[in-house]
Image: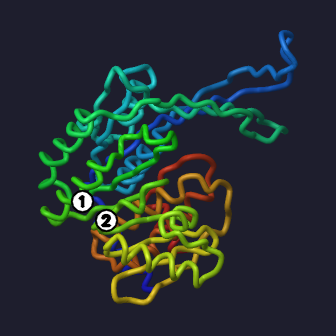
Amino acid sequence: MDKNRLLKIMDDFGKKKVIVIGDFCLDEYIYTDMNMISAEAPVPRVIINSKKYIPGAAGNVACGVKALGANVYAVGIIGNDDNGKKLVDEFKKRNVNIDGLKLFPNRNTVTYSRIVSGGGKVPKQHVLRFDAINKEKVNEEMTQDMLNFVKINISEIDAIILADYDEAGGTGIVTDKLITDLSKICKENKKVLVGDSRENFHKYVNFTIVKPNEIEASKASGINILSEIDFLNAGNKLLKNLNVDSVFLTAGEKGIFVFEKNKDMKNVPTCAKKIVDVCGAGDTVTCVSLLSKLSGASYEEAAQIASYAAAVTVSKEGTVSVTKEEIKGMLNE
């Protein structure tokens, strides 16, 4: 590994423009003290100290791209509600372009709220999570609205990330039409298309890169991954069946398995030395590997830079974005 080359690759991140299209949500953290039992019922009573809001899911991907110095456009559907307005405010604070983010009155802004209690001598921990989700699928108007924005801006951007985080049984914004049309648009305009998904990897045909984790790769390939040979078989099956240029299979402490057409699998080891919270590590790999590839890296080099970036992410608490300076610091250690 040539560290000087990896450092030089990152210098070009600021020249890139990326559309992130997918399921945007609001992460809400409610920090509390808990030292009493309610007088009304045998349940804990918490006192709210503060609240923190962070763009989550596809929002974390968009913020991750922006934090690395690139220009980013958030394209998606959220609710015209209080949480939608909070999400918009958080994007504005981070200088994320939201021209393609539309607020619809008949949608909820998906919100994941966590009550976190502790502090001082008491360790902080999640006490409860409660979510606001949607119960209905997006309609054709919403899908076409997103596709129109992509078509209008496709000549100005370098790549698209499709970030599918639907957990509610098909009520997210990623439909079969959106997947198929994005693939066609990117192919016609010779743009890089990256796919990340919880459930739909098997549909991501003709993408440039897909980035499943171990569980997602197992689902999409139908292979129960238990050993390195299983990683090899699953990655190669996805590479062939989806007709993608590369598969980045992330596997935690096992590192990143990189698959390319007509090349042997590469296993890029993890660089993590201190693990505090693994939340968001996969998003970091998506952002960094894409920008690295756009900046002239090979797929293996892109995975190497992404591994250092993920090591920064897991050393911090909660959902965080990583900067080029932090990655360079990790590389120079």
Question: Residue at left 21%, top 37%?
Answer: 145
Q: Is residue 5 left or right of residue 30?
A: left
Q: Is residue 226 left or right of residue 323?
A: right
Question: Residue at left 52%, top 82%?
Answer: 232
Estimate the x, y position of residue 226 in percent, counting from the top left.
65, 75
The vertical placement of 47 against 262, above or below, is above
Q: Quadrant of residue 74?
A: top left
Q: Are marks 1 and 2 in contact (CB under 8 Å)?
A: yes
Q: Which residue is mark 1?
A: 183
Question: How many angstroms separate mark 1 from mark 2 (CA)?
Answer: 8 Å
Q: Amino acid at mark 2?
A: Val
The vertical placement of 159 against 141, above or below, is below
Q: Which residue is mark 2?
A: 205
The crowd level at tag 1 (other Cα within 10 Å; few <14, some 14-19, many 20+) is many
Q: Quadrant of residue 113?
A: top right
Estimate the x, y position of residue 39 in percent, counting from the top left.
86, 10
Question: Residue at left 80%, top 26%?
Answer: 34
The vertical placement of 71 against 44, above or below, is below
The vertical placement of 68 against 262, above or below, is above
- Secondary element under disc 1, as helix, strand or loop, is helix
Give the number of callouts.
Answer: 2
Question: Residue at left 68%, top 64%?
Answer: 274
Residue, far top: 40
Q: Amino acid at mark 1?
A: Ser
Q: Quadrant of the C terminus?
A: bottom right
Q: Quadrant of residue 270?
A: bottom right
